[in-house]
């Protein structure tokens, strides 16, 4: 059964103000309503004691605050929490909360499945089902924040300090829904996160990187995974459309308005594919002064690959990852190796939402496709 009422999670504050006006209410009522929804986690209009009864009754007749049904919740021994949400028609998306000493980060999904089809990503192997709405993106944060507050008994204190749009999907291919969701995250009447603490991760959708720079420049992470087009083409198929030269120029342009003065490059370490010493040196050249866009201020985040059978790829050894990192660090680039978190609940990167239906038979196509570049990078 579909719900014909308006989902207020779909609105940023401006849209909610316009909605209140359409109901014949003063725009400032929207601020109260918005705070009840996002800061206090209210679902029931009756709870909203500072709103006039007549408005509450009006809202109850035409609007809802519609969370996503939770299919499952798993809590890891290390405190990582993974939720699987039902987004209808057999599709599910996941969100993961990663607690650390000085922050609590929520990894949020933007699409059910993904059309980019990165070779090392299990979401990419499942194909694309559909874009999430603004309300569905925000419902993940809304649920996680308020469920965690209750569980951790924080007395209303905020738990989630950082959001990374790094779950299922390519956020910049769902730009229209993404931007209002980001606005709510940043709004002082919403989640009040700073632009530095909200990160959009992209595989390199260049035109939308340029738009985000103008509309709402939050922190940016770019899934790089290869130092040249010959290797990146098969690993990140979007590279054929927006090759490295264009991508790096877009990164550099983004930095002119970004809240941080560097781009984070994500680099998934694949045994024998992209983890050789010469590839680390090629990366230094790529982002250095003689690279295609000149020097690109950046950090590298090396990600241990989470193997899954259909990929035909293997995780680089720890020694290899460390040797690779050493070359980057000695070349003057801040480099981190991502800790694997939530291994016991399959919450690690690239393991999200194993239950999405494969509507496009992407897995089948990718399994049949040959790995085009496997380089013998190890000394025998
Ligand atoms: S890595 Fe990101 S962009 Fe690539 S297939 Fe996976 S979800 Fe899509």
Image (cartoon, grey):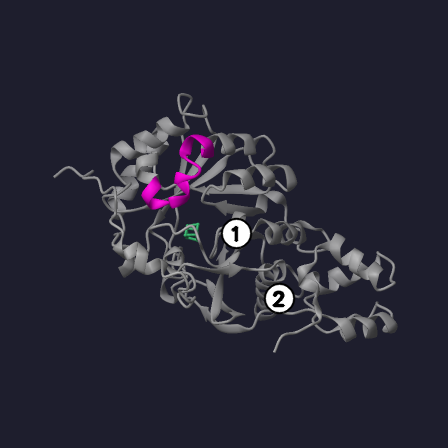
Please say if 97 is above or below 271: below
Which quarter of the picture shows residue 75? bottom left
Pointer 1 or 2: first along the chain? 2
Please say if 368 is above or below 144: above
Q: Residue furthest top?
A: 290
Q: Nearer the viewer, mark 1 or mark 2?
A: 1
- The reply to whether residue 109 is visible in this rendering is no
Tally the numbered discs: 2
Q: Residue 118 in the image: state x and y as whole percent.
A: 37, 50
Q: Residue 286 in the image: state x and y as whole percent.
A: 38, 29
Q: Residue 92 in the image: state x and y as whole percent.
A: 48, 67
Q: Can you say which quadrant of the picture contains the N terminus?
A: bottom right
Magenta-highlighted stretch: main secondary structure? helix
> Which residue occupies the foreground of this view, 315 or 64?
64
State the residue at coordinates (31%, 36%).
230
> Which residue occupies the foreground of this view, 106 or 133?
133
Highlighted range, magenta? 233-247
Q: Residue furthest bottom?
A: 1
Residue 146, numbered label: 2
- The reply to whether residue 330 is visible in this rendering is yes
State the residue at coordinates (27%, 41%).
275
Question: For residue 246: magenta?
Answer: yes
Residue labelled with disc 1 = 165
SS category of the residue bearing label 2: helix
Please say if 179 is above or below 256: below
Q: Residue furthest left?
A: 380
Q: Residue 135 in the image: state x and y as whole percent.
A: 63, 62
Question: For residue 299: magenta?
Answer: no
State the residue at coordinates (53%, 72%).
70
Q: Can you say which quadrant of the picture contains the C terminus?
A: top left
Residue 297, numbered label: none
């Amino acid at each position: 059964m579909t719900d014909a009422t308006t989902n207020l999670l779909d609105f940023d504050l401006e849209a909610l103000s316009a909605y209140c006006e359409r109901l014949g209410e003063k725009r400032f009522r929207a601020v109260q309503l918005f705070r009840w929804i996002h800061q206090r986690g209210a679902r029931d209009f009756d709870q909203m004691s500072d709103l006039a009864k007549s408005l509450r009754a009006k809202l109850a007749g035409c609007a809802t605050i519609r969370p996503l049904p939770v299919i499952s919740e798993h809590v890891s021994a290390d405190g990582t929490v993974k939720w699987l949400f039902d987004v209808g028609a057999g599709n599910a998306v996941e969100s993961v909360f990663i607690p650390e000493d000085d922050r609590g980060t929520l990894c949020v999904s933007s699409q059910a499945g993904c059309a980019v089809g990165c070779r090392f990503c299990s979401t990419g192997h499942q194909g694309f089902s559909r874009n999430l709405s603004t309300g569905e993106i925000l419902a993940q944060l809304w649920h996680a924040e308020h469920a965690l507050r209750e569980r951790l008994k924080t007395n209303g204190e905020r738990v989630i300090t950082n959001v990374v749009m790094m779950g299922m999907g390519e956020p910049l291919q769902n730009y229209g829904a993404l931007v209002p969701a980001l606005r709510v995250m940043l709004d002082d009447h919403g989640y009040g996160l700073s632009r530095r603490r909200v990160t959009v991760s992209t595989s390199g959708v260049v035109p939308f990187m340029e738009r985000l720079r103008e509309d709402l420049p939050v922190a940016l992470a770019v899934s790089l995974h290869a130092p040249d087009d010959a290797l990146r083409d098969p690993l990140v198929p979007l590279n054929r459309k927006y090759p490295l030269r264009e991508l790096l120029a877009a990164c550099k342009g983004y930095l002119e308005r970004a809240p941080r003065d560097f781009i984070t490059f994500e680099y998934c370490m694949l045994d024998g594919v992209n983890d050789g010493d010469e590839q680390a040196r090629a990366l230094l050249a790529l982002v250095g002064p003689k690279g295609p866009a000149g020097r690109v201020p950046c950090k590298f985040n090396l990600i241990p690959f989470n193997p899954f059978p259909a990929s035909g790829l293997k995780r680089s050894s720890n020694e290899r990852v460390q040797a690779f990192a050493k070359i980057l660090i000695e070349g003057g680039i801040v480099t981190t190796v991502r800790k694997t978190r939530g291994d016991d609940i399959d919450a690690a990167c690239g393991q999200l939402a194993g239950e999405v239906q494969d509507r496009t038979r992407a897995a089948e196509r990718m399994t049949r496709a040959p790995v085009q570049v496997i380089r013998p990078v190890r000394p025998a």
